[in-house]
Amino acid sequence: MRIVFMGTPEFAVPTLDALVEAGHEIVAAYSRPPRAGGRRGRELVPSPVQRRAEAFGLAVRTPVSLKTAEAQADFAALDADVAVVAAYGLILPRAILDAPRRGCLNVHGSLLPRWRGAAPVQRAILAGDAETGVGIMRMEAGLDTGPVLLEGRVAVDGKTAGALSGELATLGAALMLETLADLDARIETPQPEAGVTYAAKIDKAEARLDFSQSAVAVERVVRAMNPAPGAWIELAGERVKVLAADVLPFTFPGGAGETVDARLTIACGIGAIRPTLVQRAGRGVTSAEDMLRGFPVPTATSA
């Protein structure tokens, strides 16, 4: 097939890899424009999809918007059979949705209609979902409202957002190949009206651990914010990221948010957590045990 690929983050790369390896003709790869980053933010850093597409020698387009007549005409001129979309990050106007002969197919990281929107993986973890998945959806004008052609399920099972996203990305790539291999025979199942939830974009303020919650809920935040933006606490005026933590069911004396021992155990509304993997500002990731050797945190320290 003649395919336009549209994606931006690492989640989308396995699908692009799979399409190229399967022999599909990628007539162009669309991605969000490069962002300021690199050394002191002075360099423009291309997205993971742009880097991979350029490595394949593909034509890459990075428009700021697809709403202009020029952008839509350029897209239509590609004469694509289908557009494959995976976490692209821009709204596709009707003219874009209608341009490919076989429409636009999206790799979405949830079991629709649960967790429509920008952050389905993180929201599934935060909500304590036992399982989630990935679906191949025909795109419509609504936010993730289109019919589902194929889906797969995975257990959340204590995974971080990074690990779960990687698993879903690999599964989504395989499902997209399976879908394209027999597109005419695919049954498009409309999403049920019941069970719709929305996965709002993660706000950085959510990464500050709130110890008035239960230890179980706090540990979910730790996993949902790993690798980015990273859950954090404040110790002795210094921000410390918490990348992994154990849940302790015990009730400790003292207020929620205070350390209850010299091992960085922190009381919560119910139970406590004990960070196991941490990162101080400007330093590398280390175990909490190693950090405490050079940065002791006394009992009754507020976090």
Image: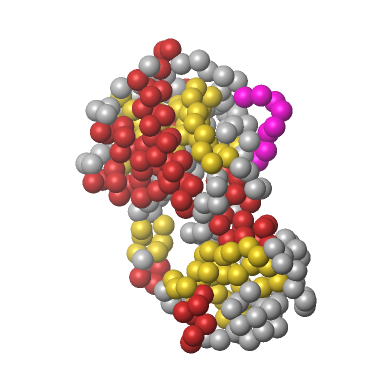
Identify the residue at horizontal 60%, vertical 37% (top origin).
Answer: 116
- Left-right relation of 73 to 140: left
Residue sitting nearer the eye, 3 or 264: 264
Let me know if residue 248 appears in the view: yes
- Left-right relation of 247 to 276: right
Q: Quadrant of residue 22?
A: top left
Identify the residue at horizontal 38%, vertical 24% (top origin).
Answer: 178
> Residue 106: percent from the left, percent from the top?
47, 32
Residue 193, magenta (yes or no): yes
Q: Return the residue found at the far front.
A: 250
Identify the residue at horizontal 67%, vertical 84% (top origin).
Answer: 299
Q: Quadrant of the C terminus?
A: bottom right
Residue 110, magenta (yes or no): no
Residue sitting nearer the eye, 120 or 89: 120
> Residue 272: percent from the left, percent from the top?
68, 67
> Residue 70: percent from the left, percent from the top?
41, 34
Q: Quadrant of residue 257?
A: bottom right
Looking at the rendering, the stretch of residues picked out in magenta corresponds to 191-198
